[in-house]
Image: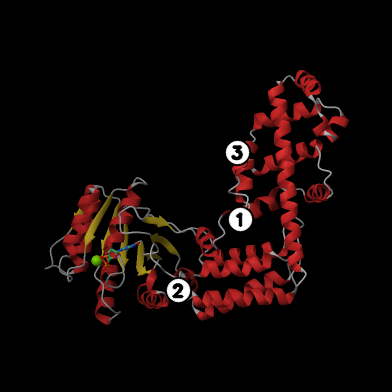
Amino acid sequence: GLAEKLQETFKKLRGKGRLTEEDVDQALKEVRRALIGADVNFKVVKDFIARVRERAVGIDVLQSLTPAQQVIKIVHDELTSLMGGSRSKIELASAPPTVVMMVGLHGAGKTTTTAKLANHMRRQGRRPLLVACDIYRPAAIKQLQVLGGQLDIPVFNMGDGVAPPDIARAAVEKARREGNDLVIIDTAGRLHIDEELMAELQNIVEAVKPNEILLVVDAMTGQDAVNVAKTFNERLTLTGVVLTKLDGDTRGGAALSVKAVTGCPIKFVGVGEKLDALEDFHPNRMADRILGMGDMLTLIEKAQANFDQEQVEKLNKRIRNMEFTLDDFVQQLNQVKKMGPIDQILGMIPGLGGMKKLKDLEVDEKDLVLVEAIIKSMTPWERQHPQEINGSRRRRIARGSGTSVQEVNRLLKQFEQTRKMMRQLMEMEKSVKKGKKGF
Ligand code: GDP
Ligand code: MG
């Protein structure tokens, strides 16, 4: 899949300290191949690569990040904006009811999504009415009634003898009378796009002027889904796309191209057959998922936002020289404190997340005050030589800081663990550097 391929590429980048222009090109070649392989539209890929390259080559190197991490971040940012940037919501009508019309080909998931969306919107306080406008397919009305029944949401139908635009109009009137502030219209599909279908859908649009026209497409169909979206959009001016069956074994290409090709944002994704398996579409999270790196990016962002570069540099040097002392420990705890709970921070670093010991390192606001009090009660010599702090010294420190000997013991143990972990990190870094020699 795309995620694995990109990760392989980035693993190679991660091992490098500094990137040349050729490095960037080499990595982007692999990104391009991965995207094409995931069935992303060719033109979309071309533009995407050009944008990433432009930003990656002129990179401003931050000290806490390797250039490779920054390239990953650029790819992530660009993936996010490719999918529309931020999350898009259903536009509610200023005068209710809000009318949402679902369109799409046979089997894309229109009827299921109609019910799922009603369920989703009801949780936000809406009072939906479902409308059965697929009068052609046998049992289509029944299917919607069954789903509505499961959710205890009303379904409006006029059988199969009335034209769909008239059904839709009658449903909106009924909703207005009975206080349903949301009308969701399920419509007929076809195996392929044809003129008759488009004409009927246009007539429904004319009749009820929907606030939203959502195209439902099956993510498994890849580029076909994108082509379908393009054609529907040309005829109906869609307001959004729902990508279904994302729980299946899809290559994800459709999610990446829909917005770029049609200009329509993906608003929801279907992730299963059950009626609660509909999620808001977050471009940001989808990019995470495509890259398969989850929290790593969050960590990078936090580091950028919070770390005082100069201090980090100094600290790194001390750690490198194994001069890390209890004074540094306090300083570092304060830095980390700004970023959030320490176990969470460490949990984001690949390879450290699984470390059992992390729980012992948990720090909260109160602990931090204690830690500072304890360390301030030590002599400068003790701070430089924590291994030499014996029982009587511990008792004196406890008295001086208003804590207990157990608390002093705990702190010294935490400090020792932190040092040990840093040593491990240093060794990891060293082995990475050795590997880099070959480039
Ligand atoms: P329609 O012809 O567009 O109305 O499609 P339906 O709503 O009848 O759905 C066709 C099939 O796709 C049904 O078996 C649904 O259960 C299934 N389906 C719809 N959405 C999803 C989804 O997000 N994930 C999975 N796995 N199946 C879905
Ligand atoms: Mg249907």
Residue 261 circle label: none
Coloring scheme used: secondary structure
Helix, strand or loop under label 2: helix
Helix, strand or loop under label 1: helix
Describe residue 30's horizontal placement relative to residue 257 as left or right: right
Q: How crowded is mark 2: few (under 14 residues within 10 Å), some or many (20 or more)?
A: many
Helix, strand or loop under label 3: helix
* Residues at marks 3 and 2, CA–CA distance in whole angstroms: 48 Å
**The residue positioned farthest toward the right in the image shown:** 381
* Residues at marks 1 and 3, CA–CA distance in whole angstroms: 20 Å
Q: State the residue position of label 1.
A: 296
Describe residue 344's horizontal placement relative to residue 56 as left or right: left
User: Label 2 near label 1: C-beta < 8 Å?
Assistant: no
Percent across and percent down for residue 8 are: 59, 68
Nearer-the-camera pick, 278 or 64? 64
Nearer-the-camera pick, 363 or 433? 433
Q: Which amino acid does label 3 sit on?
A: Lys
Q: Is residue 227 visible?
A: yes
Mark 3 / mark 2, whichever is N-terminal: 2
Q: State the residue position of label 3.
A: 359
Q: State the residue position of label 2.
A: 262
Q: Is residue 237 visible?
A: no
